[in-house]
Amino acid sequence: MASGQGTVTIDFGVFPGAQEASIAFTDATISGTSKVEAYVMADDTTADHTANDHRYLGTLPVSFSGSASAGVGGTIIGRALMKLVGTFNLRYVWAD
């Protein structure tokens, strides 16, 4: 069961974009051994991308991974085989 959760916006930059982007989150209750998982919700939107863009992001070869830093928070990294452009909302959960 998840101990914590949150939402972040990851930014792959302006055209031509990037294959990798990262975003830090803050949570003082996280431990150094926590496992972090990030994912896309189909109905999220940003100024750059519609709900439809978020819905279909999962069909692309993209992965999201997270790491934790005790008492601080963590970092979520997004990696894609092709360049992505702009911002996407991500949800994350973490647990020990």
Image (cartoon, rainbow, N blue to C red):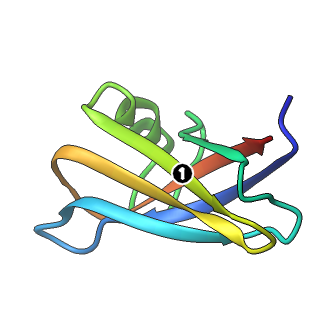
Q: Quadrant of residue 9?
A: bottom right
Residue nearest the viewer, comparing 72 with 79: 72
- Asked if residue 26 lies left or right of residue 3, the reply is left
The percent coordinates of residue 57 (x first, y second) are 36, 36
Query: Is residue 32 placed above or below 73 in the rendered structure?
Result: above
Residue positioned most to the front: 33
Residue tagged 1: 66
From what the image shows, is residue 45 above or below residue 11? Answer: above
Question: Does the rendering let one see residue 47?
Answer: no
- The image quadrant that residue 87 belongs to is bottom left
| Residue 96 appears in the figure | yes
User: In which quadrant of the rendered image does the N terminus lie?
Assistant: top right
- Residue at horizontal 71 percent and vertical 68 percent from the top: 73
How far from the left and from the top, in percent, is residue 24? 57, 71
Q: Which residue is depicted at the point 44% across and 44% down?
A: 64
Question: Residue 22: horizontal and vertical position, in percent?
Answer: 42, 66
Structural crowding at the residue carrying mark 1, measured as other residues with C-alpha within 10 Å and reported as few (<14), some (14–19) or many (≥20): many
